[in-house]
Image (cartoon, rainbow, N blue to C red):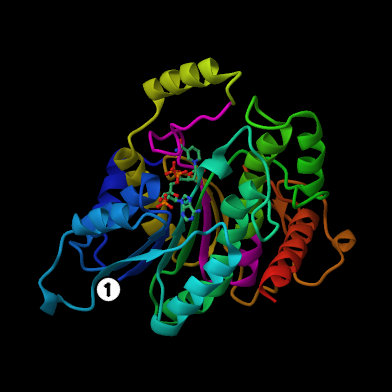
């Protein structure tokens, strides 16, 4: 675990020679907000920071609080892009707009959650037929990553940092599913016996956990495919955010939810405190050569691997049976806290491509 002095000095020493371009998906509150604010403070506002979410009023208030350098200080910009990211069509539209006007991207940070994706009781599907939990916890993150990669590659080609960070629940090594990957059967079965908002459902619980594990698959896939770019799955730990303090156990267990919430408040962290560690994970020079990083809530590296720049990703268009089904191992490299096997990652990626092409054509 990096000492706090190292975390603070690494963040404080961040003075890039270029104007960094950073997109925070889900920065109108919570960890994303605190990270965007920390980057704005560290750069004295000399950064192109884009925050994405639904609430324009919250976004404009946050942007107004960023330090503003004198105009002649370069091409800094602070902006908000509205997007309901439960819809893959919306995500695609935002990415198309961004790739048409940006020339590079240094940091793509994805923190967005939502009441639906954090709910222990409700489990259903979006209008596009995607499991609610998975839409926010995984699919929109995959699509933002895939569509914005040309901009990250452009940053890397200019010898700049290029990093995709998924803030979710890294380091537990929970296994990526190989059956019912979209959780449709799980939801169908669960609805039959437990209908409504009364109590936690198996489907909702599985949605939460499964979404976490798929972030391991996301970083494994993209890190093998684009070896010079850094892909991180990091855990923020327990943080006192709007989403983090919302515990939905249904009306039957509402008193228990209330007790958990207040017990949690005794050991959870403020978002600004936690953002310090997340920013360290984002800016750390260990990321400079690219690779996969599983990081804990202090920004500590639980496991990591840098692939050779000519490495050929094994995950596209392969029979899963030809790949190893050993969990916690990526291409023969044991990875602590990683929940994938090569076969399960290939299965997840194949399924993801099918779902997205079904929606987006
Ligand atoms: N807080 C914790 O204790 C904790 C613990 C473990 C893991 N995590 C994970 O860490 C990440 C960050 O946590 P957090 O507590 O800061 O996040 P959060 O409160 O769950 O998410 C808040 C952000 O998500 C955005 N959001 C919600 N629905 C959206 C939608 N449909 N489309 C686009 N944006 C949407 C919100 O903006 P708008 O409302 O403006 O849309 C807001 O900016 C999440 O992935 C969470 O699951 C958090």
Mark 1 highlights which residue?
A: 19
Residue under the image location 87 percent in, 66 percent down: 319
Q: Quadrant of the C terminus?
A: bottom right
Q: Residue 353 lies in what quarter of the image?
A: bottom right
Could one spot residue 335 in this view of the protein?
A: no
Who is closer to the viewer here, 120 or 156?
Answer: 120
Q: Is residue 322 left or right of residue 139?
A: right
Residue 361 belongs to the span the image colors magenta: no
Magenta segment's dominant SS is loop
Task: Identify whether 199 is placed above or below 159.
Answer: above
Task: Name the element at disc 1.
Answer: loop
- Membership of 235 in magenta stretch: yes
Name the one closer to the observer, 254 or 23: 254
Quadrant of the snapshot with the N terminus? top left
Q: What residue lies at 66% left-to-right and 73% top-to-bottom?
A: 360
Q: Position of residue 18 (x, y in %)?
A: 28, 75
Question: In the image, is residue 280 above or below residue 160?
Answer: above
Disc 1 crowd rating (10 Å Cα; few below 14, some 14-19, many 20+) is some
In the picture shown, does residue 64 fall above or below 273? below
Q: Position of residue 105 (x, y in %)?
A: 41, 73
- The quarter of the picture where residue 63 lies is bottom left
In the image, the residue with mark 1 has its CB under 8 Å from the nearest atom of ligand 1: no
Q: Nearer the viewer, residue 74 or 361?
A: 361
Residue 38: give x, y in percent of width and height. 27, 52
Q: Is residue 212 left or right of residue 246?
A: right
Q: Nearer the viewer, residue 3 or 56?
A: 56
Q: Residue at x 38, y 44 (%)?
A: 30
Q: Which residues are magenta?
A: 220-249
């Amino acid at each position: 675990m990096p000492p706090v002095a190292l975390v603070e000095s690494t963040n404080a020493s961040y003075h890039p020679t270029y104007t960094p371009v950073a997109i925070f998906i889900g920065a109108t509150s919570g960890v994303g907000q605190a990270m965007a604010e920390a980057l704005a403070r560290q750069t004295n506002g000399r950064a192109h920071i884009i925050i994405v979410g639904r609430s324009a009023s919250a976004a404009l208030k946050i942007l107004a609080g960023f330090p503003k350098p004198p105009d002649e200080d370069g091409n800094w910009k602070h902006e908000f892009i509205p997007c309901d990211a439960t819809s893959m069509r919306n995500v695609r539209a935002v990415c198309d707009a961004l790739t048409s006007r940006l020339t590079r991207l240094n940091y793509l940070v994805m923190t967005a959650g939502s009441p639906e994706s954090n709910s222990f009781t409700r489990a259903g599907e979006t209008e596009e037929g995607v499991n609610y939990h998975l839409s926010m916890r995984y699919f929109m993150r995959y699509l933002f990553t895939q569509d914005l990669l040309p901009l990250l590659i452009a940053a890397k080609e200019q010898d700049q940092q290029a990093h995709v960070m998924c803030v979710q629940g890294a380091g537990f090594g929970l296994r990526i599913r190989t059956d019912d990957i979209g959780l449709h059967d799980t939801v169908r079965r669960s609805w039959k016996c437990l209908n409504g908002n009364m109590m936690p459902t198996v489907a909702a619980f599985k949605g939460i956990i499964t979404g976490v594990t798929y972030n391991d698959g996301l970083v494994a896939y993209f890190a093998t495919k684009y070896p010079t770019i850094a892909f991180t799955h990091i855990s923020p730990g327990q943080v006192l955010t709007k989403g983090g303090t919302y515990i939905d156990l249904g009306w039957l267990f509402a008193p228990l939810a209330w007790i958990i919430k207040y017990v949690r408040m005794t050991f959870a962290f403020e978002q600004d405190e936690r953002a310090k560690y997340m920013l360290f994970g984002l800016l750390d020079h260990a990321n400079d050569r690219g690779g996969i990083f599983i990081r804990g809530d202090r920004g500590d590296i639980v496991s990591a691997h840098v692939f050779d720049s000519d490495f050929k990703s094994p995950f596209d268009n392969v029979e899963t049976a030809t790949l190893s089904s050993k969990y916690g191992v990526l291409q023969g490299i044991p990875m602590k806290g990683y929940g994938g096997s090569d076969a399960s990652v290939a299965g997840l990626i194949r399924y993801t491509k099918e779902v997205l092409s079904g929606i987006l054509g």
